Image (cartoon, rainbow, N blue to C red):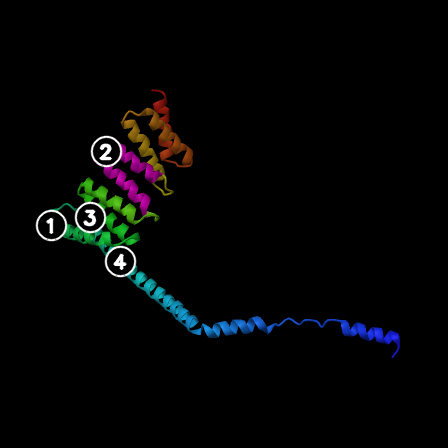
Amino acid sequence: MTKEKLEKTEKLETVEPVKVKDKDGFTQKLSDFIQKNRVGFFVGLIVIIVGIIAFSIVNGVIRLLNTKAIAQVEDFSSRFDVLQIDINSEEKASDVQTLLDELTAFAPKHKGYAGARAFFIMADICANKNDWVEAEKAWNNAAIAGMGAYIEPVALYNTAIAVEEQGDIPRAIEFYAKAANFDFPGASRAQFAIGRLNESQNNKDAALEAYRTLLSKWPDDQVWSNLAQSRIISLSVK
């Protein structure tokens, strides 16, 4: 063997072998870990499955209860519609009281639409009987039960009416202001009521502010904005 060939051979022999990554190492370790902890994984899986089943059952029960509650409150509403005509007549007094008693028992036990609607019907009955104290309580409870739903601002507006009927103008203004903060069809009317009540208290500056707010927030309103504009003109010349 020549010297040159010997050098090449020596160089080849001194080259370190390439290390091949053990691709199966992590897989094997994971497999061993799962095997050692198979009982824990199995129990965890069972817990997850049971949780999903329980969640589905609870949701199903809630939906069923809500469906029954809504059906019941619609029955209350239908009965009230029949009784509303001549609601203060003696011949209907017993039926009205029975309905009111049932609503009083039902409403506090339900939230959302069913509870809010039940309180609303109670308030309507009381308002028809000119019992504004109880009407206020029921409408306010309707607003609380229906919080976040469309019924909330309507209930707040009606609460303001009940409070105004009792002659408590400052508190009525507070409730009208709460209703006016919502985006619902009666908002501009609630804002006008704030100005109207401030006028009744000879609070000209507050009335003007309320009317100007109405014009600013509801410029396209064809009724209450026009009335607010006329009141601004009238107050400005005084």
Q: In this figure, which residue is indicated by the disc labeled 4?
A: 69
Q: Report x, y in % for residue 117.
A: 27, 51
Residue at x-position 17% and y-position 43%: 129
Q: In this figure, which residue is indicated by the disc labeled 2?
A: 168
Amino acid on which the number 1 mark rests in the picture: Glu
Looking at the magenta stretch, what is its main secondary structure? helix
Contact (Cβ within 8 Å) of mark 4 with mark 1: no
Quadrant location, the N terminus: bottom right
Circle 3: element type: helix
Task: In this rendered view, identify the residue nearer to me: 32 or 192.
Answer: 32
Q: Report x, y in % for residue 214.
A: 38, 33
Q: In this figure, which residue is indicated by the disc labeled 1?
A: 91
Contact (Cβ within 8 Å) of mark 3 with mark 2: no
Query: What's the magenta region?
Result: 151-180
Amino acid on which the number 4 mark rests in the picture: Ala
Categorize mark 1 by other alpha carbons within 10 Å: few (<14), some (14-19), many (20+).
few
Amino acid on which the number 2 mark rests in the picture: Asp
Task: Locate residue 28: give its quadrant.
Answer: bottom right
Mark 3 against mark 2, which lies toward the viewer? 2
Q: Earlier in the sequence, mark 4 or mark 1?
A: 4
- Residue 119 is inside the magenta segment: no
Amino acid on which the number 3 mark rests in the picture: Gln
Q: Earlier in the sequence, mark 4 or mark 3?
A: 4
Q: Earlier in the sequence, mark 3 or mark 1?
A: 3
Residue at x-position 23% and y-position 33%: 168
Contact (Cβ within 8 Å) of mark 3 with mark 1: no
Q: In this figure, which residue is indicated by the disc labeled 3?
A: 84
CA gap, disc 3 to disc 2?
27 Å
